[in-house]
Image (cartoon, helix red, strand yellow):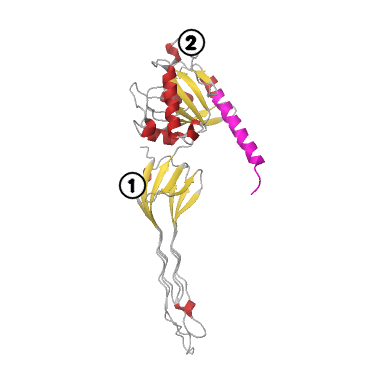
């Protein structure tokens, strides 16, 4: 089951209380205060784990609590700090405070960590209150409570290419023939109810990741159909591929609708490089792409997943665009001033 949004409650550990104690030892008549400090409470941390693909585990456990710190003891012994707790999430997870909407951070790769709830400080024991004028203090401090939060975790898939199209545009079929992914394929709309990822293998060990996203319909940016679930997952893709089936009633209208929905959701998303891919070309008998006004597209491809025609040209074209983008990113990084 693909789960891409959950709300969980987290609670950091409370700090241990300080101790009120006096040294009692034979032949030491005036030992003085020796109460130790309490230990610090454990933190709650969200950490990226590339072995995970969904947030499914959080549907079984929605409350995470770190260990509290131990109380201080006599002989100036500080209590043990509490053990923290780690929430493993897949890369691409955005973390927000569910109550306030505050953005706390995002996990982009394996090992990334975000502190979401800080453990409470341990209280001071009475030894810390001793002074020249106050030599036998009985004061001590309780430990601070750990932070509590309701977290909203939202997964946005990270892929190189996102396949964008209306229901039954041929996205799942294309993914199944260019990668080892096996998405559900059927002849009715909304076959794909959750995103699928596939790794496309080229020669010389070159690979890129393609995401097959649920179909988009007019009004998707307002939540119609599977709209917001779809649009959330193409935010992180580098390149978009707009799939237009040749058996569509109006190719231009279908392309314009897809572009309009993406732009209505996010101008930044609409500004990403995109290609037009005509699918089901076996129905026309040739691979000549139909006429279409798409001046912003960097390329137009015509393919048939059923007959495997045009696929090599499509993969090579997408790879070339991705390679150009990576070179540009490296150039900008090299020219950026040092902090």
Give the residues drawn in magenta, as a range: 316-339
Image position, residue 284 (x, y; %): 44, 10
Q: Is residue 89 visible?
A: no
Up/down of 58 relative to 120, above or below? above
Q: Is residue 335 magenta?
A: yes
Q: Could you tell me what secondary structure mostly forms the magenta stretch? A: helix
Tell me how far mark 1 sits from mark 2, CA to CA. 51 Å
Measured as percent of width and height from the top left, residue 108 is found at: 50, 43
As rendered, which of 214 and 62 lies closer to the eye?
214
Residue 252 belongs to the span the image colors magenta = no
Quadrant occupied by the N terminus: top left
Up the image or down, 16 lies above or below 231; here it is below
**Which numbered circle lies on residue 286?**
2
Q: Residues within 10 Å of mark 1 (few under 14, many from 20)?
A: few
Under circle 2, the secondary element is: loop
User: Which numbered disc, 1 or 2, marks the residue that appears first in the sequence?
Assistant: 1
Q: Is residue 70 above or below residue 52?
A: below
Q: Quadrant of residue 212?
A: top left
What residue is disc 1 on?
60
The front one of 93 and 105 is 105
Would you place residue 90 above or below residue 179 in this image? Answer: below
The answer to whether any part of residue 275 appears in the image is yes
């Amino acid at each position: 089951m693909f789960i891409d949004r959950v709300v969980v409650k987290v609670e950091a550990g409370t700090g241990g209380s300080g101790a009120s104690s006096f040294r009692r030892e034979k032949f030491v008549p005036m030992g003085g205060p020796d109460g130790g400090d309490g230990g610090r409470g454990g933190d709650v941390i969200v950490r990226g784990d590339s072995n995970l693909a969904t947030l499914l585990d959080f549907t079984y456990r929605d409350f995470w609590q770190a260990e509290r710190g131990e109380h201080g003891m006599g002989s100036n012994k500080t209590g043990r700090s509490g053990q923290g707790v780690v929430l493993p999430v897949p890369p691409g997870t955005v973390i927000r405070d569910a109550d306030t909407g505050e953005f706390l951070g995002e996990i982009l790769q394996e090992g990334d960590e975000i502190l979401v709830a800080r453990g409470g400080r341990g209280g001071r024991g009475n030894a810390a209150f001793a002074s020249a004028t106050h030599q036998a203090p009985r004061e001590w401090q309780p430990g601070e409570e750990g932070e509590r939060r309701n977290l909203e975790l939202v997964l946005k898939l990270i892929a190189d290419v996102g396949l964008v199209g209306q229901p039954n545009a041929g996205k799942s079929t294309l993914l199944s023939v260019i990668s080892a992914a096996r998405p559900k394929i059927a002849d009715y709309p909304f076959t794909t109810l959750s995103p699928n990822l596939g790794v496309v293998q080229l020669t010389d060990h070159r690979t890129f990741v393609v995401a097959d996203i649920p179909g988009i319909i007019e009004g998707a940016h307002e939540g119609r159909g599977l709209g917001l679930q779809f649009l959330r997952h193409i935010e992180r893709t580098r390149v978009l591929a707009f799939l237009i089936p040749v058996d569509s009633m109006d190719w231009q209208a279908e392309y314009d609708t897809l572009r309009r929905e993406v732009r209505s959701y996010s101008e930044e998303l609409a500004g990403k490089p995109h290609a037009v891919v005509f699918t089901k070309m076996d129905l026309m008998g040739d691979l000549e792409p139909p006429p279409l006004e798409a001046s912003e597209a960097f390329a137009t491809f015509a393919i048939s997943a059923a007959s495997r025609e045009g696929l090599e040209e499509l993969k090579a074209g997408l790879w070339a665009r991705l390679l150009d983008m990576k070179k540009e990113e490296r150039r900008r990084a090299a020219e950026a001033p040092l902090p």
